[in-house]
Image (cartoon, helix red, strand yellow):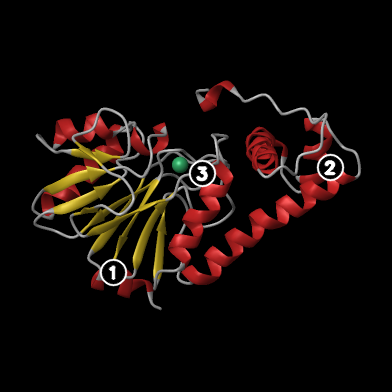
Amino acid sequence: MNINDLHENHDLALIRADNPSPFTLEGTNTWIVGRNPAWVIDPGPLLDAHLDLVAQEVTRRGGAGAIVLTHDHADHAEGTSGLRQRLAGLPIAAARGDVDIRLSGGDRIGPFEVIATPGHAADHLSYVSGKVAFTGDTVLGHGSVFITPDPGALTDYLDGLGRLRELDLAWICPGHGPVVDDPAAKLDQYIAHRLDRELKLVSALARGLRLPEDLLDDVWADAPVYLRAAAAVTLRAHLDKLDDEGRLPSGVVRPELPSWLGH
Ligand SMILES: [Zn+2]
Protein backbone atom coordinates (compact mmCIF):
# COMPACT_ATOMS: atom_id res chain seq x y z
CA MET A 1 0.00 0.00 0.00
CA ASN A 2 1.16 3.47 -0.84
CA ILE A 3 2.40 5.69 1.99
CA ASN A 4 0.29 8.58 0.66
CA ASP A 5 -2.77 6.45 1.37
CA LEU A 6 -1.77 6.36 5.01
CA HIS A 7 -1.22 10.09 5.38
CA GLU A 8 -4.15 11.27 3.28
CA ASN A 9 -6.87 8.68 3.89
CA HIS A 10 -6.14 8.53 7.59
CA ASP A 11 -5.40 12.24 7.90
CA LEU A 12 -2.34 11.94 10.06
CA ALA A 13 0.97 13.70 10.37
CA LEU A 14 4.30 12.42 11.61
CA ILE A 15 6.65 14.80 13.36
CA ARG A 16 9.89 13.12 14.30
CA ALA A 17 11.93 14.49 17.18
CA ASP A 18 15.64 15.11 16.73
CA ASN A 19 16.72 12.65 19.44
CA PRO A 20 18.33 9.76 17.53
CA SER A 21 20.06 7.02 19.57
CA PRO A 22 20.36 3.22 19.67
CA PHE A 23 17.08 3.10 21.63
CA THR A 24 15.16 5.78 19.77
CA LEU A 25 16.41 4.83 16.27
CA GLU A 26 15.96 7.88 14.00
CA GLY A 27 14.18 9.73 16.83
CA THR A 28 10.82 9.60 18.58
CA ASN A 29 7.75 9.69 16.35
CA THR A 30 4.99 12.08 17.41
CA TRP A 31 1.77 11.22 15.57
CA ILE A 32 -1.02 13.74 15.06
CA VAL A 33 -4.29 12.18 13.98
CA GLY A 34 -7.41 13.82 12.54
CA ARG A 35 -8.58 17.41 12.96
CA ASN A 36 -11.21 19.50 14.74
CA PRO A 37 -10.00 18.12 17.07
CA ALA A 38 -6.67 16.42 16.37
CA TRP A 39 -5.20 13.83 18.72
CA VAL A 40 -1.52 13.79 19.70
CA ILE A 41 0.11 10.45 20.34
CA ASP A 42 3.33 10.90 22.35
CA PRO A 43 4.62 14.50 22.50
CA GLY A 44 8.16 13.10 22.54
CA PRO A 45 11.21 14.50 24.33
CA LEU A 46 11.48 17.97 25.81
CA LEU A 47 12.94 19.65 22.72
CA ASP A 48 11.53 23.11 22.07
CA ALA A 49 11.92 22.97 18.29
CA HIS A 50 10.04 19.66 18.19
CA LEU A 51 7.23 20.82 20.49
CA ASP A 52 6.87 24.03 18.46
CA LEU A 53 6.33 21.99 15.29
CA VAL A 54 3.83 19.70 17.01
CA ALA A 55 1.89 22.66 18.41
CA GLN A 56 1.83 24.36 14.99
CA GLU A 57 0.47 21.24 13.31
CA VAL A 58 -2.18 20.81 16.03
CA THR A 59 -3.23 24.44 15.66
CA ARG A 60 -3.43 24.01 11.87
CA ARG A 61 -5.76 21.09 12.53
CA GLY A 62 -8.12 23.10 14.71
CA GLY A 63 -6.74 22.21 18.13
CA ALA A 64 -6.38 18.91 19.96
CA GLY A 65 -8.80 16.66 21.85
CA ALA A 66 -6.09 15.24 24.09
CA ILE A 67 -2.51 14.11 24.35
CA VAL A 68 -2.48 10.33 24.56
CA LEU A 69 0.65 8.53 25.77
CA THR A 70 1.75 5.06 24.75
CA HIS A 71 3.89 4.85 27.91
CA ASP A 72 5.69 7.16 30.28
CA HIS A 73 9.33 6.75 29.20
CA ALA A 74 10.99 10.14 28.80
CA ASP A 75 11.56 9.89 25.05
CA HIS A 76 7.77 9.72 24.59
CA ALA A 77 6.33 11.66 27.53
CA GLU A 78 8.91 14.22 28.66
CA GLY A 79 7.53 16.89 26.30
CA THR A 80 3.98 16.55 27.63
CA SER A 81 4.00 19.59 29.93
CA GLY A 82 5.80 21.71 27.32
CA LEU A 83 3.19 20.86 24.70
CA ARG A 84 0.46 21.53 27.20
CA GLN A 85 1.90 25.00 27.83
CA ARG A 86 1.81 25.66 24.09
CA LEU A 87 -1.74 24.32 23.74
CA ALA A 88 -3.50 25.52 26.85
CA GLY A 89 -5.92 23.26 28.65
CA LEU A 90 -5.16 20.09 26.78
CA PRO A 91 -6.03 16.93 28.75
CA ILE A 92 -3.55 14.07 29.07
CA ALA A 93 -4.65 10.46 28.73
CA ALA A 94 -2.44 7.52 29.71
CA ALA A 95 -2.41 4.32 31.75
CA ARG A 96 -0.65 5.78 34.81
CA GLY A 97 0.82 8.89 36.33
CA ASP A 98 -0.60 12.36 36.88
CA VAL A 99 -3.11 12.30 34.01
CA ASP A 100 -6.61 13.66 33.36
CA ILE A 101 -7.98 10.53 31.72
CA ARG A 102 -6.84 7.14 33.01
CA LEU A 103 -6.92 4.60 30.19
CA SER A 104 -6.78 0.83 30.11
CA GLY A 105 -7.21 -1.85 27.47
CA GLY A 106 -10.69 -1.91 25.94
CA ASP A 107 -11.35 1.81 26.47
CA ARG A 108 -12.08 4.22 23.65
CA ILE A 109 -10.74 7.74 23.34
CA GLY A 110 -11.38 9.99 20.36
CA PRO A 111 -10.97 7.88 17.21
CA PHE A 112 -8.98 5.19 19.04
CA GLU A 113 -9.61 1.81 20.53
CA VAL A 114 -7.15 1.30 23.39
CA ILE A 115 -5.22 -1.98 23.36
CA ALA A 116 -3.18 -3.01 26.41
CA THR A 117 0.31 -3.93 25.22
CA PRO A 118 2.51 -4.08 28.34
CA GLY A 119 6.00 -5.55 28.17
CA HIS A 120 8.41 -2.85 27.07
CA ALA A 121 6.82 -0.86 29.90
CA ALA A 122 4.16 -2.03 32.34
CA ASP A 123 1.89 0.91 31.41
CA HIS A 124 2.21 0.50 27.66
CA LEU A 125 -0.90 1.06 25.53
CA SER A 126 -1.38 0.95 21.77
CA TYR A 127 -4.05 2.90 19.92
CA VAL A 128 -6.00 1.57 16.95
CA SER A 129 -8.01 3.70 14.56
CA GLY A 130 -9.58 1.77 11.70
CA LYS A 131 -6.78 -0.22 10.09
CA VAL A 132 -3.97 1.80 11.66
CA ALA A 133 -2.25 0.83 14.92
CA PHE A 134 -0.05 3.27 16.83
CA THR A 135 2.22 0.93 18.72
CA GLY A 136 4.72 3.12 20.58
CA ASP A 137 7.60 0.87 21.65
CA THR A 138 5.61 -2.38 21.47
CA VAL A 139 6.49 -2.72 17.78
CA LEU A 140 9.15 -0.53 16.14
CA GLY A 141 9.76 0.27 12.49
CA HIS A 142 12.88 -1.86 12.62
CA GLY A 143 14.85 -3.82 15.23
CA SER A 144 13.33 -5.17 18.43
CA VAL A 145 12.45 -3.74 21.82
CA PHE A 146 13.66 -4.49 25.34
CA ILE A 147 11.25 -5.96 27.86
CA THR A 148 11.17 -4.37 31.30
CA PRO A 149 11.17 -7.10 33.96
CA ASP A 150 7.89 -6.81 35.83
CA PRO A 151 5.78 -9.73 37.04
CA GLY A 152 4.47 -11.50 33.94
CA ALA A 153 6.04 -8.92 31.61
CA LEU A 154 7.12 -11.21 28.79
CA THR A 155 3.94 -13.29 28.82
CA ASP A 156 1.89 -10.09 28.82
CA TYR A 157 4.01 -8.73 25.99
CA LEU A 158 3.35 -11.80 23.84
CA ASP A 159 -0.38 -11.55 24.68
CA GLY A 160 -0.41 -7.92 23.55
CA LEU A 161 1.31 -8.79 20.27
CA GLY A 162 -1.30 -11.51 19.84
CA ARG A 163 -4.13 -8.99 20.41
CA LEU A 164 -2.69 -6.74 17.71
CA ARG A 165 -2.20 -9.71 15.40
CA GLU A 166 -5.93 -10.54 15.62
CA LEU A 167 -6.86 -7.12 14.22
CA ASP A 168 -7.29 -6.39 10.53
CA LEU A 169 -4.49 -3.83 10.21
CA ALA A 170 -3.07 -2.16 7.12
CA TRP A 171 -0.45 -0.02 8.88
CA ILE A 172 1.60 0.12 12.03
CA CYS A 173 2.76 3.59 13.04
CA PRO A 174 5.51 2.91 15.58
CA GLY A 175 7.09 5.10 18.24
CA HIS A 176 10.43 4.93 16.42
CA GLY A 177 11.45 4.13 12.86
CA PRO A 178 9.43 3.99 9.65
CA VAL A 179 5.80 2.97 9.24
CA VAL A 180 5.16 -0.74 8.74
CA ASP A 181 3.01 -1.63 5.71
CA ASP A 182 2.76 -5.37 6.46
CA PRO A 183 1.53 -5.49 10.08
CA ALA A 184 0.67 -9.19 10.14
CA ALA A 185 4.15 -10.18 8.91
CA LYS A 186 5.83 -7.77 11.32
CA LEU A 187 3.82 -9.05 14.30
CA ASP A 188 4.51 -12.66 13.34
CA GLN A 189 8.19 -11.78 13.13
CA TYR A 190 8.13 -10.11 16.56
CA ILE A 191 6.40 -13.09 18.17
CA ALA A 192 8.75 -15.55 16.45
CA HIS A 193 11.77 -13.48 17.50
CA ARG A 194 10.83 -13.65 21.20
CA LEU A 195 10.08 -17.36 21.05
CA ASP A 196 13.36 -17.95 19.20
CA ARG A 197 15.26 -16.15 21.98
CA GLU A 198 13.46 -18.31 24.52
CA LEU A 199 14.43 -21.50 22.68
CA LYS A 200 18.07 -20.35 22.57
CA LEU A 201 17.92 -19.51 26.28
CA VAL A 202 16.42 -22.87 27.20
CA SER A 203 19.19 -24.53 25.18
CA ALA A 204 21.91 -22.50 26.91
CA LEU A 205 20.47 -23.36 30.33
CA ALA A 206 20.33 -27.04 29.36
CA ARG A 207 24.04 -26.84 28.53
CA GLY A 208 24.68 -25.64 32.07
CA LEU A 209 25.15 -21.90 31.58
CA ARG A 210 24.02 -20.01 34.69
CA LEU A 211 25.70 -16.58 34.76
CA PRO A 212 24.26 -13.50 33.05
CA GLU A 213 27.44 -12.78 31.07
CA ASP A 214 27.60 -16.33 29.75
CA LEU A 215 23.89 -16.37 28.87
CA LEU A 216 24.19 -13.02 27.08
CA ASP A 217 27.27 -14.18 25.13
CA ASP A 218 25.43 -17.30 24.06
CA VAL A 219 21.83 -16.20 23.51
CA TRP A 220 22.42 -12.58 22.45
CA ALA A 221 25.65 -13.20 20.52
CA ASP A 222 24.24 -11.03 17.71
CA ALA A 223 23.54 -8.01 19.94
CA PRO A 224 25.96 -5.09 19.45
CA VAL A 225 27.88 -3.92 22.52
CA TYR A 226 25.77 -0.77 22.89
CA LEU A 227 22.60 -2.86 23.23
CA ARG A 228 24.05 -5.31 25.75
CA ALA A 229 22.52 -3.57 28.76
CA ALA A 230 19.11 -3.70 27.06
CA ALA A 231 19.69 -7.37 26.25
CA ALA A 232 20.47 -8.01 29.94
CA VAL A 233 17.16 -6.40 30.91
CA THR A 234 15.31 -8.58 28.42
CA LEU A 235 17.25 -11.67 29.58
CA ARG A 236 15.91 -11.05 33.05
CA ALA A 237 12.33 -10.88 31.72
CA HIS A 238 12.92 -14.18 29.90
CA LEU A 239 14.29 -15.81 33.07
CA ASP A 240 11.28 -14.56 35.03
CA LYS A 241 8.94 -16.14 32.47
CA LEU A 242 10.71 -19.51 32.65
CA ASP A 243 10.61 -19.28 36.45
CA ASP A 244 6.86 -18.53 36.42
CA GLU A 245 6.35 -21.56 34.21
CA GLY A 246 8.46 -23.82 36.45
CA ARG A 247 11.07 -24.20 33.69
CA LEU A 248 14.02 -22.40 35.27
CA PRO A 249 16.81 -24.68 36.51
CA SER A 250 18.37 -23.95 39.89
CA GLY A 251 21.46 -21.80 40.32
CA VAL A 252 20.70 -19.23 37.63
CA VAL A 253 22.00 -15.74 38.45
CA ARG A 254 19.73 -12.96 37.24
CA PRO A 255 21.36 -9.86 35.75
CA GLU A 256 21.31 -6.62 37.72
CA LEU A 257 18.95 -4.01 36.35
CA PRO A 258 20.56 -0.78 35.15
CA SER A 259 19.70 2.44 36.98
CA TRP A 260 18.19 4.02 33.83
CA LEU A 261 15.32 1.58 34.11
CA GLY A 262 14.15 3.39 37.23
CA HIS A 263 13.89 0.23 39.34
ZN1 LIG B 1 10.80 4.93 22.95
Near mark 2 (Cα within 10 A), the count class, few <14, some 14-19 or many ≥20, is some
Residue 72 placement (x, y as % from top left) = 38, 35
Q: Earlier in the sequence, mark 2 or mark 1?
A: 1
Marks 2 and 3, the one that precedes in the sequence: 3
Q: Amino acid at mark 3?
A: Gly
The residue drawn where x is 26% and y is 38% is 51
Front label number (3 vs 1) = 3
**SS for callout 2:** helix
N-terminal-most mark, 3 or 1:
3
Distance between mark 3 and mark 1 Cα atoms? 24 Å
Residue 255 sits above or below residue 183 on the image: above
Q: Residue furthest bottom?
A: 1
- Could you say which is closer to the camera, residue 91 or residue 30? 91
Circles 2 and 1: CB atoms closer than 8 Å:
no
Q: CA distance from mark 2 to mark 3?
A: 23 Å
According to the picture, the residue beneath numbered tag 1 turns out to be 130
Q: Label 2 vs label 1: CA separation? A: 43 Å
Q: Which residue ends up furthest to the right in the rendered image?
A: 207
Q: Specify the amino acid type for callout 1.
A: Gly
Residue 119's label in the rendered image is 3
Taking the spot 67% from the left edge, 56% from the top edge, the residue there is 195
- The residue under label 2 is 205
Q: Residue furthest toward the front?
A: 246
Give me the residue at 90% from left, 39% from top.
Answer: 208
Q: Is residue 129 left or right of residue 123?
A: left
